[in-house]
Image (spheres, grey):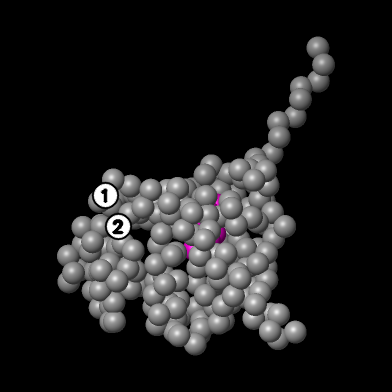
């Protein structure tokens, strides 16, 4: 009998529908595609799926809400800032569903992997690898406003309980945001549409400066 075939090491990449293979240990911006991000985020459920409605409330829809709140709260924000806001949870298109390669690779290093993915995604779209602290704080405020309404409208939180975790939203009400859960294909399409709108603004700004 011939010698035994050596077992392959645990794979550290995920195959995307675009055909890309994204290495979780060393993600390359060249393997990041916005279509993969939109597809994945539209199928990753917020609140671990424990929300009311006929559809899961997706990370893609959450990202749209956060970008909208951030934009309305910060009228002087640049197109680059808006893109960072839209992509603030983009690493979750890979790690949000806790795929088996992710579990094998990360262990207790979730944040390390998340930061590497964030850098690869940002560099792919011509953004700084990581946002400055001031911008990150402003996006976080928008994130908390979205979380408050998600918690109270969809996830069964009483308002008093939600206020303890997320604070009291100011300037926004339940009827001013797109909180009703969308089907995955609609969330995906809206995410891509908003990405293209912001990207067009970024390109026009670049041309104006040239």
Residue 14, given in percent of the width and then of the height, sits at: 62, 45
Is residue 208 positioned above or below 177 on the image? below
| Residue pictured at 23% horizontal, 64% vertical | 152
Q: Which mark is residue 53?
A: 1
| Residue pictured at 17% horizontal, 71% vertical | 160
Q: Quadrant of residue 122?
A: bottom right
Residue 24, given in percent of the width and then of the height, sits at: 63, 53
Residue 133, given in percent of the width and then of the height, sits at: 53, 82
| Residue pictured at 69% horizontal, 60% vertical | 29
Depth check, front residue: 190 or 61: 190
From which residue to which does the magenta span run?
A: 89-94
In the rendered image, the quadrant that contains the C terminus is bottom right
Q: CA distance from mark 2 to mark 1?
A: 8 Å
Does residue 68 appear anywhere in the picture? yes
Q: Would you say 210 lies left or right of 14 here?
A: right
Q: Would you say 80 lies left or right of 85 here?
A: right
Q: Would you say 76 lies left or right of 51 here?
A: right
Q: Which residue is mark 2?
A: 180
Q: Which mark is residue 88?
A: none
């Amino acid at each position: 009998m011939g010698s035994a075939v050596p077992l392959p090491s645990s794979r550290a990449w995920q195959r995307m529908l675009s055909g890309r293979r994204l290495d979780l240990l060393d993600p390359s911006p060249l393997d990041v595609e916005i279509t993969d991000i939109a597809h994945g985020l539209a199928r990753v459920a917020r609140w671990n799926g424990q929300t009311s409605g006929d559809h899961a409330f997706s990370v893609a829809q959450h990202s749209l809400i956060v970008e909208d709140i951030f934009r309305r709260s910060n009228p002087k924000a640049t197109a680059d800032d808006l893109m960072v806001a839209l992509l603030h949870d983009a690493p979750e298109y890979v790690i949000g569903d806790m795929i088996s390669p992710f579990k094998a690779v990360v262990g207790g290093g979730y944040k390390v992997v998340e930061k590497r993915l964030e850098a690869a995604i940002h560099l792919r779209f011509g953004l700084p690898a990581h946002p400055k602290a001031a911008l990150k704080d402003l996006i976080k405020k928008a994130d908390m406003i979205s979380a408050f309404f998600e918690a109270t409208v969809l996830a069964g939180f009483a308002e008093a309980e939600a206020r303890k975790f997320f604070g009291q939203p100011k300037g926004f009400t339940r009827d001013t945001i797109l909180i009703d859960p969308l089907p995955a294909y609609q969330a995906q399409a809206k995410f891509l549409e908003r990405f293209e709108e912001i990207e067009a603004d970024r390109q026009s700004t670049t041309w104006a400066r040239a």
